[in-house]
Image (cartoon, rainbow, N blue to C red):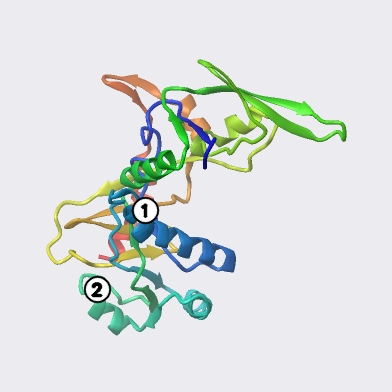
Amino acid sequence: VSGAVLLERERLTSGTTWHTAGLLWQLRPSDVEVELLAHTRRVVSQELEKETGLHTGWIQNGGLFIASNRQRLDEYKRLMSLGKVYGVESHVLSPAETKTLYPLMNVDDLYGTLYVPHDGTMDPAGTCTTLTRAAAARGAQVIENCPVTGIHVRTDDFGVRRVAGVETEHGSIQTPCVVNCAGVWASAVGRMAGVKVPLVAMHHAYVVTERIEGIQNMPNVRDHDASVYLRLQGDALSVGGYEANPIFWEEAVKSRTRAAGGLRLKTSTVKGYTLWSDDLRRA
């Protein structure tokens, strides 16, 4: 990474990173994703700590996909078959076996689950800090409080538009390559170069429960049909997901109101209940 420069608009992890779930599920329908996730797991769980001496916060507590219908269970069986090809250990469990693994779960309406014992979670801020340390050791430069204000694009002799440089509040950097890692703000950065980024950011909510006796070391849970997840957080759970009637980021920004201590986004308790009701059914 020698010669690479990371430009951070404020401070690293001060945007959406710090409250990211940090879940790592190894099995996806795409073989490319499975390979990428396997690589990510090796880096986060082993290689970064060996290289930097810093811990990414990796916790291998396993992952559990729950199937509330036959079609979903058949999909999980296909995922298990794909995992075997890439060496990802996984097991399709019956409701009774799921209850044995996760005694606190209500399994009355389940057809089965897919259990991946080597799934887990990482600490988003810790992982970012560790990646930064590793990149800097290899010659990269990280500049904080340096928002990008523009991207210079030129057209070459063949009529191809190419990046020529990046403009910031503190000066410009000549470069033939820009990697857009702006997350929620990726579309805005793309527009600076005349590129449309097919990304729609949504405003979400999550809750952290009080201490739950017996939840320690339980796997993280994902319900694709209800679009919710339950992430182990010490002796409690962090619960979140995708609402059926989401608030898009641009709408949320427009509706934000001034409040003591900073900006507060208006939210709907109805949206929250739509999400949490599916989570509560599993308890």
Residue tagged by mark 2?
102
Question: Residue farthest to the right?
Answer: 158
Residue 136 disc label: none
Residue tagged by mark 1?
48
Tell me the distance, in whole angstroms, between the alpha carbons under discs 1 and 2.
31 Å
Q: Which x, y percent locates residue 138?
A: 45, 42
Q: Identify the residue at image location x=45%, y=29%.
A: 8
Label 2 secondary element: loop
Question: Residue farthest to the top?
Answer: 170
Q: Which x, y percent locates residue 244?
A: 47, 51
Q: Identify the residue at image location x=28%, y=51%.
A: 55
Q: Left or right of 192: which side holds 208?
A: left
Q: Which x, y percent locates residue 86?
A: 51, 75
Closer-to-camera residue (167/213): 167
Q: Amino acid at mark 2?
A: Tyr
Q: Which x, y percent locates residue 132?
A: 39, 40
